[in-house]
Image: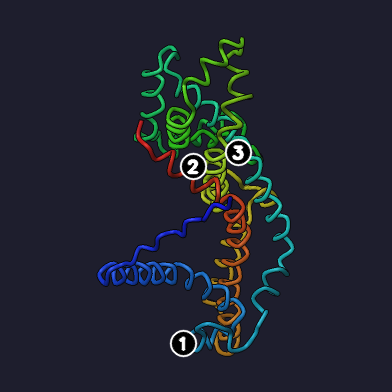
Amino acid sequence: MSVKKEKPVKIKKCLSDRIADIAINGIAVLMIAAIVYPLWFIIIASFSNPADVANGEVWLWPKEWVLDGYRELFRQSEIWRSYGNTIFYTVAGTFAALLINIPAGYAMSRKDMMGRKWINLYYLIPMFVSGGLIPVYLVVQQFNLIDSVWVMILPFSVSTYNIIVARTFFHTSIPEGLWEAAQIDGCGTIRYFFLFALPLSKAIIAVIGLWTAVGIWNSWFNALIYLQDESLQPLQLLLRRILISNQSLLGAATGEMAADLRRVSDMMKYASIVISTVPIMCLYPLLQKYFNQGVMIGAIKE
C-alpha cells in the first residue's frame, strides 16, 4: 500500500510583503557594495597608473596594468624579514592569548569559584582605568623585554574584554548538568575543562583567535615604542617607514623627478595596503562558521 506524500503548502505573499522583501534585499545589496567596493578599488588602484586614478578613470578595472608599485616595494630587502616577524608575532601572540584568556574565562564562569566577584572586579578596573603609556613602558623595561620578540607577545596577551566574552560563552552555552555528570564519573575540574568544555568551545576559540590575530597583524604602535632594532620590527612599521621616507624625498625633489617620485609613492601606498591586509582577510572564510556562532552566543548577557 503506497503512501501519498503531501505536497508542501506554498504560502502566497501579499503585495506589501513582496515590497518589503524587495526593499530589504535592496538595502542589503547596497550595504554589501558599500563595504566591498572600497576594498576592490584599493586592489585595482594598486595595479593602475596613479594618473588614471587621480583623473577618476579607474572604476571597476584598471585602465592600464602597472606593477611598478609592487616592484619598488619588494625591492626593499627588509620586507620579507618584516613579513616573517609579523607572521611569528601573529601566530605566537594568538596562541598566548588563547592559552591565557580561554582558561581565565572558564574559571570566572564557575559559580563555585572562591572570590569570584572580587576577581571579576579586579579584571574590570583596568578595562576602564589604564595605567598610561609611561608606567607600562617602565614595567616592560624592568622585565628586560625592550627590543625582544616577546614584547609583542607576552605583555599584551591578557584582554579583559576577551575574558568576559569567554566567561559569558561558558556560562550560557555549556549546561551545568554536564559538569554534574562528569563529577559522578570522578572527573575533576581540570580534566573536565580539557575533555568536555574545551572541545565544545570551538566557536569562542575561533572568535577570540580571529580578534587577536587581526589586532596583532595590524599593530604598529607597540612595535614603534618597544622595538628599536629594525631586524625585529613587523611589516606595518616597515611600510610606515618606507612611505614616510618617500614623502621626505618627494618634498626635496623638483621638476620631472618630483613627478616620478609622486607616481611611485602613490603606487607603493596602494600596494602596501594590499599586501598588509589580504593575508589576514583570507583567515575569515576559514573561521566564518565558528565566528558567527561565537559572536551571537558570546553577546548574550549573563
Where residue 165 sits in the image (x, y, percent)?
A: 44, 36
Position above or below: 26 against 186:
below
Q: Which of 223 and 39 is in front in this view?
A: 39
Q: In which quarter of the image is residue 61?
A: bottom right
> Could you give the CA–CA distance between mark 3 and mark 1, rounded to whole angstroms?
43 Å
**For residue 123, what is the image quadrant?**
top left
Q: Which of marks 3 and 2 is in front?
A: 2
Sequence-wise, the earlier of marks 2 and 1 is 1
Amino acid residing under circle 1? Gly
Total labels: the figure holds 3
Label 2 residue SS: helix
Residue that numbered label 1 is attached to = 56
- Crowding at dot 1, Cα within 10 Å, few <14 / some 14-19 / many 20+, comes out as few
Q: Label 2 is placed on what type of residue?
A: Gly
Q: Marks 1 and 2: in contact by CB < 8 Å?
A: no
Name which residue lies at 48% across and 73% down. Answer: 37
Q: What is the x, y in percent for residue 20?
A: 29, 68
**Horizontal relation, residue 233 to residue 158: left or right:** right
The quadrant in which the C terminus is found is: top left
Q: Name the residue under label 2.
A: 294
Q: Left or right: where does residue 122 sit relative to residue 254?
A: left
Please state the horizontal and vertical placement of residue 87, each as a whole percent of the image.
67, 50
User: Residue drawn 53% across and 88% down?
Assistant: 52
The earlier-in-sequence mark between 3 and 1 is 1
Q: Give the residue drawn at x 60%, y 46%.
A: 227
Residue 177 relative to residue 286: left or right: left
Q: In this view, does 175 lie to the left or right of 277?
A: left
Identify which residue is drawn at 73% across, 59% down.
Answer: 80
Residue under label 3? 153
Question: Which of the two marks, 2 or 1, is nearer to us in this view?
Answer: 2
Mark 3 residue type = Ile
Q: Can see residue 222?
A: no
